[in-house]
Amino acid sequence: MDFRRDWMLQRFEEYGKSLRRLEKYLLWQNCSSPIRIENDQLRLLMDRIAHVHENPVREGIVDQPESYVHSSARDYTGISGLVAVKVVQTQGFFAVRRLSAN
């Protein structure tokens, strides 16, 4: 499995170089206000996870986040996803909020 990891890191690095950025690996799109989420900011972290999970719903690809086969939202609902994901333990925090239910 290391060959895939190395291949992906190489692609991220090449993309970062193509943008002439200081970042060695660029996974997320550039934005004007990047943020760092610290370990004690559970609510903010869960909000960002929910935002990512809702992207396929907002784009009209699926009706529910866990229906998107490439999403870690599946792991948060107890369905095994395509990639091994470490689910953030919420410890009493009410799971990932569902924007599509609003």
Image: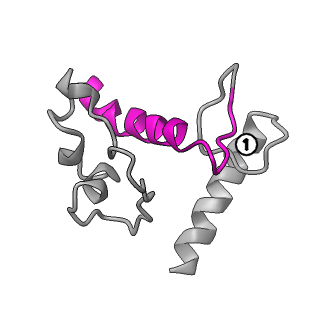
- Residue at 29% over, 59% down: 75
Residue 13 lies within the magenta run? no
Range covered by the magenta-colored residues = 34-60
**Residue found farthest to the bottom:** 1
Prevalent SS, magenta region: helix
Which kind of residue does numbered mark 1 sit on?
Answer: Gly
- Direction from residue 73 to residue 24 in the image, left or right: right
Query: Taking 89 as reference, is 1 above or below it?
Result: below
Q: Position of residue 51 (x, y in %)?
A: 41, 32
Q: Identify the residue position indicated by label 1 in the image.
A: 16
- Residue at 20% over, 62% down: 79
Q: Position of residue 91 (x, y in %)?
A: 42, 56
The residue tagged with tag 1: helix, strand or loop? helix
**Residue found farthest to the right:** 22
Q: Number of marks in the image?
A: 1
- Residue at 33% over, 46% down: 95
